[in-house]
């Protein structure tokens, strides 16, 4: 056997267990739902066994439903806003905390607590803090003088999304910081030192050294961030139940409600698969970027 | 090099196995008592049962989401267990949301408890999904069905009128008033009409101290629909006539309360417990309250530091309230159908229904149970609910009730938030509800 | 190690250190305020936690919400369940995930693109889509009502996360380390376990923490696959306080605090290792 073939075998040996595991546990659910989404299984056809294949009817119906279109819009607004905020601030914090100063270690650890809290607790906490009269956020904003009257955060369909985004960023910023700090510390100090000797200033060093060297970390963080934000469920489910008036309803909650509250199983699967397809496209895009970097 | 590959494979396999063994240890304790194991044992005892018929005890699992009532339910089960030696009942608490999910998944997988509790408006959907067994024949033989009130009983029927379970308790809604606030505003008695109600709301609202005249639940789930139904029916409209003037009027009336600051906008995020908490904290002078909440005052779970009084909900054209309550059904695929029915009958005898409802603070579902005690007439709070029951309407029964309900609470929220007029909001609901009702009308049982 | 930090502080100058400290403290205040709020609410009485006025510390301090939680007979059981599920799923995730990340990061094998895509894809499946079909599988193989069921399901989410996060780490290890290992006569496995993994200690600790948390914080899987109350983890019981009682803020917050505290302790402990790992790396360079 050639050395290359031997190497390949070793590689497969390391990859196989995890790969097969994931394929086994997750492959079936995916196939199951794809089939379901092309049938008309709902409360009427389920028990009678009269469900049949209906082609793309579920998908067509979805895209003619104004609520679904609103949900789709909400999902993108939520994802893009969260991603922009948590990546930018997360990166800044990572830059700050990757430096050595007196409180760097302990404070970075403390900030991370936000990320580690169970989402169910965080969502409850958010629901309380964004209350209109008893909420501390309104109270603080009024004390500072930023607002004169309480903002109807979770009550009004125009502000509920802002509150949900804020809570999600509170979790997402530390998450971004954690992964980016790990990437930053991977950059050897020598590189910076030689750059300083060459006369590069701080910004030049950041844009010409830090960013390129962190490309794969950054891409991974953005990719994972997109996936987790796009399929958000717990946060809205507990904090707003998707309301008021579907203003915080996203694909995750919408699909869940279809399947588990309204028993529109096929429609629920179709909605979940739309979510999946959006992510799939993003995933392909990511893959192209990372493999380019590999070559 | 081949050896090396083998080594890698061996190590990873060993790792996988170790994980498996570890997991097996952790899990074995639970497996012994899991429902899967239960069905296995009962299946095997059934096949080899002839030799030891007398000794075998059938295990029957009951899933419920009772909270403060759980102890009373456990007691019924214990009494039943000690009354005979053939059947053993085990009650398990599963939160409402979770239980609904389990039924839905159970409908697909067939893994269900033996007996399950369900909120009455949801039962029709689950019957359609095949979650509950048809036990009509056994219940007809029983000969006591005519003692049950028609409304609650109808919620256990499929579209052909066959019973799939028994109602367990009823509740309805009434108006709870903080008499301290009302008296201070110069109001001596709770309002009876919408006009009076509106006036009282105005008098008791104290914006400076964030006290609202009224609080209710208008949350985006079944609770929101539940609390809205009385307002709808009071105008003479009903679920089949959402496009009527009355329906729009009911929404506009509630919307007006919000827009004039007599009711907090936050009601769109409040469950019934949240509305009650607001009332208990003195943030609302009146609240739409359910029968079960009396027991929470008496147990101290909710502290009311005021003089309070129950009254019928104010009326527009006619008095109206809404029936709530839980049903118990025998789940499909159980190996102990007869035993389950036997327990249901035991639980629902007149005496047991009366005892249980008294302990748990509920209204009985049998007319002869209500006659056994003066509990529901002697306590003036329960007396109000007893009276409200006369004009209380059932939701559905309809297999697509969750979808109908969603259309209704969405319309209500749009009106309360001032995003749509009552007429416009209802027009959207009608677009969803009417086609459903045209296909399958609501089973007409009065 | 300590000497290194001191010198770096001196060279950077006190002023810049002070400025950074101020910013860091501000950041900490913003991020920790919700946690303070959580704790503060948990010591308030029912009336105060739902009162008309917002109070910034418990005016009438009470331990009742905590006592209510701790006197719940299911509490200790749930705690045990949470720990078991978290450790089990962490072990599975690390056992499967780290070797795979290594294989993907350091070997050029045909099909690696599609492997990576598959792992990415698995992260994209929303929970609601997984519950029913997974339930069907677990039902068939008898995993319902065991700790292994939810642990396997949670791991199926953690493994791809580990692969995606650790792959770049493994890739970043200089080839010279491979060669050094070979010269030392290390076998493939030994080189992986005793050279590669320690080389990316930070990353490994990070994924250990996160895969533990995935298990600790899980709600949907544990509840769907384990209905029995004696099998349910802590996260599941938070819903006890919602439903008909209304939102009992003080009790919920106390419960949340109980859920968060062990994680904080664990992390503070591990944080030392992470910081230690970083400094050790710097010294080597």
Image (cartoon, helix red, strand yellow):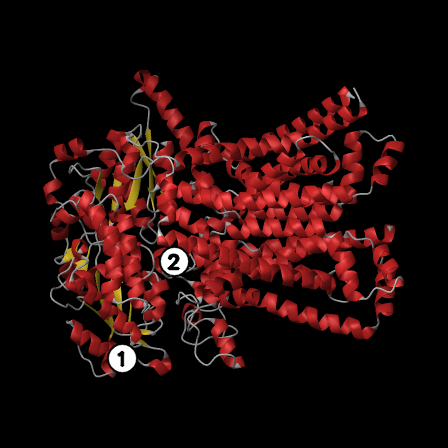
Residue A16 picture location, percent across and down: 65, 29
Q: Is residue B137 above or below residue B271?
A: above
Residue B312 picture location, percent across and down: 17, 66
Separation of marks 1 and 2 at Cα, in angstroms: 32 Å
Q: Residues within 10 Å of mark 1 (few under 14, many from 20)?
A: many
Mark in front: 1 vs 2: 2
Chain on which label 2 sits: A
- Which residue is disc 1 drawn over? B204
- Quadrant for the N terminus of chain B, please: top right
Chain on which label 1 sits: B
Q: In terms of secondary structure, where does tag 2 sit?
A: loop
Residue A283 picture location, percent across and down: 58, 44
Front position in the image: A151 or B63:
A151
Residue at horizontal 25 percent and vertical 38 percent from the top: B127
Q: Is residue B43 above or below residue B340?
A: above
**Residue B400 appears left or right of C185:** left
Residue at horizontal 26 percent and vertical 67 percent from the top: B421
Question: Mark 2 and mark 1 in contact (Cβ < 8 Å)?
Answer: no
- Which residue is disc 2 drawn over? A246
Q: Residues within 10 Å of mark 2 (few under 14, many from 20)?
A: many
Q: Is residue A218 above or below residue B298?
A: above
Q: In terms of secondary structure, where does tag 1 sit?
A: helix
Residue B86 visible in the current orientation:
yes
Q: Quadrant of residue B53?
A: top left
Residue A13 picture location, percent across and down: 70, 28
């Amino acid at each position: 056997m050639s050395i290359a073939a031997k190497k390949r075998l070793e590689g497969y040996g390391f990859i196989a267990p995890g790969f097969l595991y994931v394929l086994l546990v997750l492959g079936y659910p995916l196939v199951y739902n794809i089939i379901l989404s092309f049938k008309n299984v709902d409360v009427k056809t389920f028990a009678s066994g009269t469900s049949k294949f209906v082609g793309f009817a579920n998908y067509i119906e979805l895209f003619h439903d104004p609520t679904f279109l609103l949900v789709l819009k909400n999902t993108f607004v939520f994802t893009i806003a969260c991603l922009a905020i948590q990546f930018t601030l997360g990166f800044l914090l990572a830059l700050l905390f990757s430096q050595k100063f007196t409180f760097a270690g302990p404070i970075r650890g403390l900030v991370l607590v936000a990320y580690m809290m169970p989402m169910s607790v965080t969502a409850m906490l958010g629901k309380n803090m964004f209350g209109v009269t008893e909420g501390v956020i309104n109270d603080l904003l009024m004390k500072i003088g930023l607002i004169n009257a309480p903002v109807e955060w979770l009550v009004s369909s125009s502000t509920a999304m802002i509150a949900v985004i804020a809570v999600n960023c509170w979790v997402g910023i530390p998450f971004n910081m954690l992964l980016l700090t790990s990437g930053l510390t991977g950059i050897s100090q020598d590189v910076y030192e030689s750059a300083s000797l060459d006369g590069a200033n701080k910004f030049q060093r950041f844009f010409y050294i830090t960013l390129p060297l962190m490309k794969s970390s950054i891409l991974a963080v953005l990719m994972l961030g997109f996936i987790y934000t796009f399929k958000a469920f717990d946060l809205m489910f507990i904090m707003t139940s998707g309301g008021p008036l579907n203003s915080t309803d996203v694909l995750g909650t919408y699909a869940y409600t279809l399947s588990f509250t309204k028993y529109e199983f096929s429609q629920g699967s179709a909605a979940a698969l739309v979510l999946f397809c959006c992510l799939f496209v993003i995933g392909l895009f990511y893959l192209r970027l990372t493999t380019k970097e590999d070559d | 090099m081949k050896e090396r590959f083998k080594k890698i494979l061996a190590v990873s396999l060993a790792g996988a196995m170790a994980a498996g063994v570890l997991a097996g240890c952790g899990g074995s304790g639970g497996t012994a008592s899991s429902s899967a194991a239960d069905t296995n044992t009962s299946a095997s005892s059934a096949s080899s049962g002839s030799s030891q018929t007398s000794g075998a005890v059938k295990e029957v699992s009951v899933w419920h989401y009772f909270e403060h009532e759980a102890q009373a339910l456990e007691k019924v089960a214990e009494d039943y267990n000690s009354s005979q030696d053939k059947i053993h009942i085990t009650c398990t608490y599963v939160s409402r949301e979770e239980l609904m999910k389990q039924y839905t998944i159970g409908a697909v997988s067939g893994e269900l408890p033996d007996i399950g509790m369900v909120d009455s408006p949801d039962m029709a959907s689950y019957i359609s999904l095949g979650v509950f067994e048809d036990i009509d024949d056994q219940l007809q033989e029983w000969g006591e069905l005519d003692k049950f009130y028609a409304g609650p009983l109808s919620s256990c029927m499929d579209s052909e009128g066959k019973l799939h379970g028994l109602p367990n308790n009823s509740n309805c809604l009434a108006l709870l008033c903080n008499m301290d606030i009302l008296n201070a505003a110069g109001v001596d008695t709770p309002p009876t009409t919408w006009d009076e109600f509106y006036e009282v709301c105005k008098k008791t609202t104290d914006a400076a101290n964030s006290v609202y005249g009224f609080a209710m639940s208008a949350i985006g789930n079944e609770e929101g629909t539940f609390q809205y139904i009385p307002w709808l029916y009071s105008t003479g409209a009903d679920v089949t006539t959402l496009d009527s003037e009355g329906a729009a009027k009911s929404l506009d009336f509630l919307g007006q309360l919000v827009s004039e600051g007599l009711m907090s906008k936050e009601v769109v995020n409040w469950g019934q417990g949240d509305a009650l908490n607001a009332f208990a904290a003195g943030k609302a002078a009146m609240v739409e309250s359910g029968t079960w909440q009396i027991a929470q005052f008496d147990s101290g779970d909710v502290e009311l530091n005021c003089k309070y009084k129950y009254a019928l909900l104010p009326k527009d054209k006619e008095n109206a309230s809404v029936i709530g309550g839980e049903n118990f059904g025998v789940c499909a695929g159980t190996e102990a159908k007869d035993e389950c029915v036997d327990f249901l009958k035991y639980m629902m005898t007149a005496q047991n229904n009366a005892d249980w409802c008294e302990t748990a603070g509920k209204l009985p579902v049998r007319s002869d149970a209500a006659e056994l005690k003066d509990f529901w007439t002697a306590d003036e709070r329960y007396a109000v609910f007893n009276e409200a029951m006369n004009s209380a309407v059932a939701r559905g029964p309809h297999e697509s009730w969750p979808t109908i309900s969603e259309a209704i609470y969405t319309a209500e929220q749009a009106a309360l938030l001032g995003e749509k007029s009552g007429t416009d909001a209802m027009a959207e609901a009608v677009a969803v509800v009417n086609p459903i009702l045209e296909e399958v009308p609501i089973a007409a049982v009065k | 190690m300590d000497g290194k930090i001191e010198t770096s502080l001196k060279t950077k100058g006190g002023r810049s250190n002070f400025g950074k400290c101020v910013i860091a403290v501000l950041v900490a205040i913003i991020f920790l305020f919700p946690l303070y709020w959580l704790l503060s609410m948990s010591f308030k009485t029912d009336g105060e936690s739902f009162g008309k006025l917002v109070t910034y510390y418990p005016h009438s301090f009470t331990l009742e919400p905590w006592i209510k939680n701790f006197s719940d007979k299911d509490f200790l059981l749930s705690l045990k369940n949470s720990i078991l599920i978290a450790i089990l799923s962490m072990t599975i995730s690390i056992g499967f995930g780290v070797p795979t990340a290594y294989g993907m990061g350091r070997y050029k094998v045909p099909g690696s693109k599609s492997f990576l895509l598959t792992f990415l894809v698995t992260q994209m499946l929303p929970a609601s889509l997984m519950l029913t079909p997974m339930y069907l599988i677990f039902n068939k193989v008898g995993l319902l009502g065991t700790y292994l069921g939810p642990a396997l399901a949670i791991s199926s989410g953690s493994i791809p996360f580990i692969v995606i996060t650790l792959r770049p780490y493994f890739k970043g290890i200089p080839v010279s380390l491979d060669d050094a290992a070979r010269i030392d006569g290390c076998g493939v496995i030994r080189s992986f376990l005793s050279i590669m993994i320690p080389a990316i200690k930070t990353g490994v600790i990070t994924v250990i923490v996160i895969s533990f948390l995935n298990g600790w914080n899980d709600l949907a899987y544990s509840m769907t696959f384990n209905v029995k109350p004696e099998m349910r983890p802590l996260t599941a019981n938070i819903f006890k306080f919602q439903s008909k009682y209304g939102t009992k803020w003080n009790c919920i917050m106390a419960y949340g605090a109980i859920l968060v505290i062990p994680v904080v302790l664990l992390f503070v402990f591990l944080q030392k290792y992470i910081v230690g790992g970083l400094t050790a790396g710097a010294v080597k360079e």
